[in-house]
Image (cartoon, grey):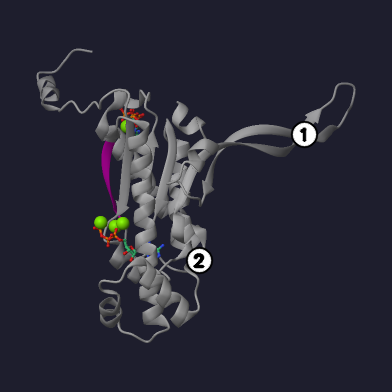
Amino acid sequence: MAKSKFEYVRDFEADDTVLPNCWIVVRLDGRNFHRFSEQHEFKKPNDDRALHLMTKCAQTVMQELEDIAIAYGQSDEYSFVFKKKSRWFKRRASKFMTHVVSQFSSSYVFYWKDYFKDQQLLYPPGFDGRIVLYPSNQNLKDYLSWRQADCHINNLYNTVFWMLVQRGGLTPVQAQERLRGTLAGDKNEILFSEFNINYNNEPLMYRKGTVLIWQKVNEVITKKIKLPKEEEEKEVEVTRTKTKVVPLHCDIIGEQFWEEYPEILAE
Ligand code: ATP
Ligand code: ATP
Ligand code: MG
Ligand code: MG
Ligand code: MG
Ligand code: MG
């Protein structure tokens, strides 16, 4: 096709190809979800509908886009790790980031009613995105550990905070005041002595967040087949192996996870 005289404007586009051989991490985070969660009456501190919807969206992202090895999510954020060797969109940063965030955002709206039923979606939510490269496996493990440690710190704080408000009768300001300067041990102690809650028995999804990995699963399906010599179609059960995105709520800070799933870092 003949080029127009306007073609030169393409030269103004910046080259955002990312470095080869690095893990490409895209993290997204809900925009102003403090307000969004209040307006949509999220149960505090952890609304299961919202957490499951986030994970559904992340599974959709992994299935629809190429080369995602693992994802990790908590609260209103999700991180997606693309394989070191990925050649998707010639490793252009803006393509990775925008495809992840837009696929996730449209999924959030698309699947909203499956999780929130009668709770109407009041306005279109948004998500921000960023991209970070990690050159070594250790850097990547430390990145994921950092997000899981953040999940733990926030969830412990939020669990005590909302106990003090919902069951202790404190105002949010008083609860905040009460918790100022407390250490993890103090918070565990308040939960245990005042509310009879052992923090370690709180659901794993709240304490550890959600890890998404690819796993081979056997599926039994019924197939209609027509056997030679027979008139009618027959239903038979066949087992086939599929690769699916599976959610886990486990520790990823220790080495055990990486020893159990060595294939994640192998590619
Ligand atoms: P920003 O736009 O800067 O990200 P934000 O209000 O989204 O602002 P975050 O630090 O991302 O701030 O915090 C997300 C907030 O969303 C949490 O403080 C929490 O109140 C709320 N939230 C997210 N997920 C849930 C959930 N599953 N259940 C209850 N509250 C949630
Ligand atoms: P990529 O993912 O690379 O963008 P693409 O299939 O979206 O692939 P584009 O170059 O963006 O390729 O072209 C968009 C295509 O969408 C057009 O070729 C056209 O077929 C279709 N399309 C978009 N808008 C309309 C419209 N309003 N009516 C009919 N077809 C449309
Ligand atoms: Mg923030
Ligand atoms: Mg947010
Ligand atoms: Mg957040
Ligand atoms: Mg297009």
- The residue indicated by pointer 2 is 202
Left or right: residue 70 compared with residue 89: right
Residue at left offset 41%, top offset 67%: 120
Indicate the amino acid at tag 1: Lys
- The span picked out in magenta is 125-132
Residue at left offset 43%, top offset 66%: 46
Give ligand 5's quarter of the image.
Answer: bottom left
Residue at left offset 9%, top offset 18%: 5
Q: Main secondary structure of the magenta part?
A: strand
The residue furthest bottom is 169
Q: Mark 1: few, some, or many residues within 10 Å (few <14, many ≥20)?
A: few
Q: Nearer the viewer, residue 143 or 13?
A: 143
Left or right: residue 232 compared with residue 50: right
Whether label 2 lies within 8 Å of ligand 1 gets the answer no
Q: Nearer the viewer, mark 1 or mark 2?
A: 2
Secondary element at tag 2: loop
Q: Is residue 41 visible?
A: no
The residue furthest top is 2
- The residue indicated by pointer 1 is 224
Q: Quadrant of the N terminus?
A: top left
